Image: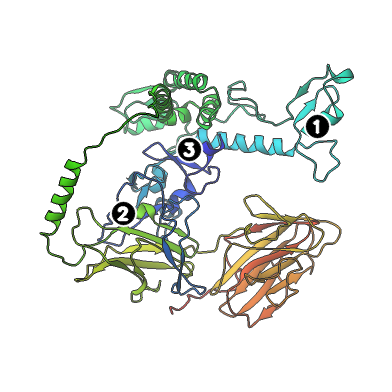
Amino acid sequence: MEEELKCPVCGSLFREPIILPCSHNVCLPCARTIAVQTPENESLDSECAAGGGVDHADKLSLHSETDSGYGSYTPSLKSPNGVRVLPLVPAPPGATASQRGAGPAGSSLTCPQCHRSASLDQRGLRGFQRNRLLEAIVQRYQQGRAAAAAAKCQLCDRSPPEPAAVLCEQCDVLYCAACQLRCHPARGPFAKHRLVPPPGAPGPPGGGDGGGKGAGGGRKLPTCAEHDLENYSMYCVSCRSPVCYQCLEDGRHGKHEVKALGAVWKQHKVVWDQINHCTLKLRQSTGLMEYCLEVIKENDPSGFLQISDALIKRVQVSQEQWVKGALEPKVSAEFDLTLDSEPLLQAIHQLDFIQMKFPVTVPPVPLLQLEKCCTRNNSVTLAWRMPPLSHNPVEGYILELDDGDGGQFREVYVGKETLCTIDGLHFNSTYNARVKAFNSSGVGPYSKTVILQTSDVAWFTFDPSSAHRDIVLSNDNQTATCSSYDDRVVLGTAAFSKGVHYWELHVDRYDNHPDPAFGIARINVVKDMMLGKDDKAWAMTEGGVSKGATVGVLLDLNKHSLTFYINGQQQGPPAFENIEGVFMPALSLNRNVQVTLHTGLEVPQCVKQPKLPSN
């Protein structure tokens, strides 16, 4: 079921999920990153693609080790799921919190799964309903997974112990599979002992009492999104959404058909029959079925009615596809296929003859494909195509980008590809991009201008691909420890060459006076010794670090200095100065230390970050 609980944008478990008009779900934070805004008095051409995200693995991108955005060609990078699009331009200074959450006028949202677009009204993202059922299921799933992971074998002689597979009710001992066969065989005096799953382990699909109550008692009744003090009590059939008493008093639903919430809830629970039927036919628990069962167990009528129609439709489509695949007659291996190619060849000859009648002129305006565009940290990816029924040949494209500060446009890519990634841009900057096509007759007109907003701060994790093999990463690559008593090095996934950047590392475990080192390094730093022992790393060791301490690293490439903080206090003047080049966050530690990385942080107040000049 875990795939049903993951956001299609970030690939992680849903956080504050909202329901799009197409019935798909997306995280509220991710929804802010997939909204698109166009410049004033312009509109962008966008199409609803039938396929998924960017699938051109061999496309070229523009990469530079500096923040200029210009350099050599390297393979294009995808966003985590291939469907991320451009974030909204930051709200103007002085805007209220509600205005920032709503998004500017002219914004739209493209579903990352079906690519249907929806315009945002004056309420912005708050106009989409919150999927409380999905949010509750994700929370319960995380709690169950954490409880199951915490159960360890009590007889393992290895470190760490293996996860427990069974619990003996008579012995009251947790066993892993190997220890259970060795120490608790199902014969002799143990033959009558009862072995059960360990505490917190998930039960079979459809298990539970279906009451929708956790260990802490009854669930809090959901309140109306428009009126915080009112609970949902009725269901508007016309709007297909739950409403409260105050909503009816306001008059918006005065002429609509309104029914009691509980009665409509019971009518819509026919989804149970669909789920049960598909489960019996498939003979196995699929992710969709498990998710549906969790929805039914939730005791939240208003939340259930928000998604019941879409859920019933999904189950019906799944059933129809299964029946079609099971009953479809098989074609014999000796089946003979005869193809009459004469009409096809004749049509091809006619097509060639018609095309020769058109004079060769400059190419038309390229169309930007916003559903295939994405942004990540200080990198942006653009995709475009030619309009349909275009008879003029295209020999290549020219992509132009300004300097992020309202300056002149400059060419960043010239070639035949229709997808380009530009790396090394300034953080917290707004860029304008446009593209045009050319052929032997000349250069065609520019496309519409699109606004690209890079991240205001850097978000990154530890990099498992470049880490030493003894490094152990967890918590979505944000927590690091080591399996060796020797010091090993792990780098971050971000690289910096300009600007001011700050991140923190929290010391979760600190045993037997280890010697962790925190700092920065080159990409080719030696990874089997303490950080700072060679000439490719700059680091701080010890210096008041203990369990629970937070080490801050401030890399100021405007002043070419490196400064350290412990628990928010600056540790003297800059530790290193006159540093230049490309640097990556770095850490060295052994098995006695565990550290958690925190990124996306503002620079400490004592440091001002000026606007970087354009190159």
**Label placed on residue 175:** 1
Can you identify the residue that label 3 sits on?
228
Q: Earlier in the sequence, mark 1 or mark 3?
A: 1
Residue located beneath label 2 in the image: 106
> Above or below — where is 417 with respect to 610?
above
Label 2 or label 3, whichever comes before in sequence order: 2
Residue 524 position within the rendered picture, expressed as x and y whole percent measured from the top left: 64, 71
Question: x%, y% of residue 461?
Answer: 61, 58
3D distance between C-alphas at marks 1 and 3: 49 Å
Circle count: 3
Q: Quadrant of residue 200?
A: top right
Pick the quarter of the image with the N terminus. Answer: top right
Q: Give the percent coordinates (x, y) of residue 311.
A: 43, 29
* Element on which disc 1 rests: strand
* Front: mark 1 or 3: 1
* Residue furthest left in the image: 357
